[in-house]
Amino acid sequence: MVQIITDSSTLFTIEEGKKMGVDVLPLCVTCGDIEGRDCHMDMDAFYGEIAKGNNPTSSQPPIGEVMEAYEKYPDAEIINIAMADGLSGTYQSACGAKESVDNCDNITVINSKTLCGPHRYMVKKAIQMKKEGKTAKEIIAWLEYAREHQESFLIPQDFDFLRRGGRLTPMAATFASVLNLRAIMTQTPDGCRLDKFGMKRSMKLAMKAVVDHLEEVKLDARHIVYVSHARAEEDAKKAVAMIKERLADVEVELLELGAAFVTQGGPQCVAIQYIEK
């Protein structure tokens, strides 16, 4: 038996995971007077604390919960698909939990090298492959292929959220949002940090620059694009429309970010990501 485990970078709740037969372990989030678990928080209260000037923080799921998830399936071949190492301690924590349980030889922890949309797709595809009777080895081989065939771009409204989070390359750390310019960030090839991709004078031009890139790398029906946002639905919908107009064969899905990823990108950020199906 193959059992899939993942974290809330997928933007799945615990309940959604149960319906799919997947254990979802939410990241922990704290902001001002509130603390809770990613994708299970009162988001109005969360944004309210940010509006008061409180800085949100996030951390990986408790290692004890990860161990409990592993121990629930002593006879299964477990695949834990974790969010990108370097952008969170989640992957390293998952590896540490593996070494602490008796069934460690049956556990594979995958560094997805991504987060949110592509991570979500990797989990959905792994579930599909499991239902089709694919072995753990076959599922792992596809996951290792898929993580090398995806890209992510982030357009923050407030660059200080990224700066405080320390997830930037040294060059990107000096890439200040000045003169009302919109910074465009992308993941480094190893997925561990964020680096500069470009700078534009408006959100519209920043989104256009990303879509220009998607057109240059020749996205087609083999790909799915995710547009995610932190209460920037109007901008996100404009990005979706732009992508559909210029890349008619590409599937596009709109998502709203959970609290842990608002912590990284800040309110009103927009993320555009793709992965090969």
Image (tube, rainbow, N blue to C red):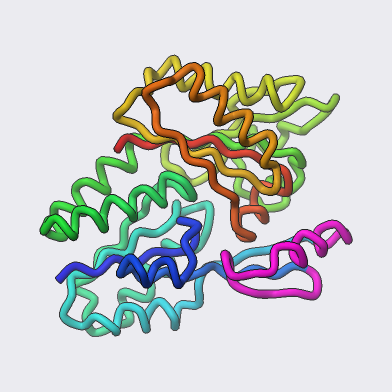
Locate the N terminus by quadrant.
bottom left
> Hey, which residue is sitting farthest right in the picture?
52
Q: Position of residue 221 (x, y in %)?
A: 32, 27
Percent position of residue 253, x then y:
47, 40
In front: 158, or 86? 158
Q: Is 50 part of what is drawn in magenta?
A: yes
Q: Quadrant of residue 276?
A: top left
Residue at the image point whose x is 33% and y is 81% from the top = 100
Residue segment shown in magenta: 32-54
| In the displayed structure image, the side of residue 180 where residue 175 appears, left or right | left
- Determine the image quadrant of residue 158: top right
Q: As drawn, is 125 to the left or to the right of 92?
A: left
Residue name at image x 18 percent, y 59 percent = 131
Q: Is residue 97 magenta?
A: no
As drawn, 97 above or below 187: below
Classify 166 as above or below 177.
below
Instruction: Tell me: 227 left or right of 112.
Output: right
Q: Position of residue 166 (x, y in %)?
A: 65, 50
Q: Residue at x 37, y 18 (%)?
A: 218
Nearer to me, 36 or 12: 12
Image coords of residue 27 (percent x, y) = 54, 67
Tell me if 93 is positioned left or right of 270 in this view: left
Picture residue at 27% right of the left edge, 48% below the top: 143
- Rendered image quadrant of residue 65: bottom left
The quarter of the image holding the C terminus is: top left
Q: How many marks?
A: 0
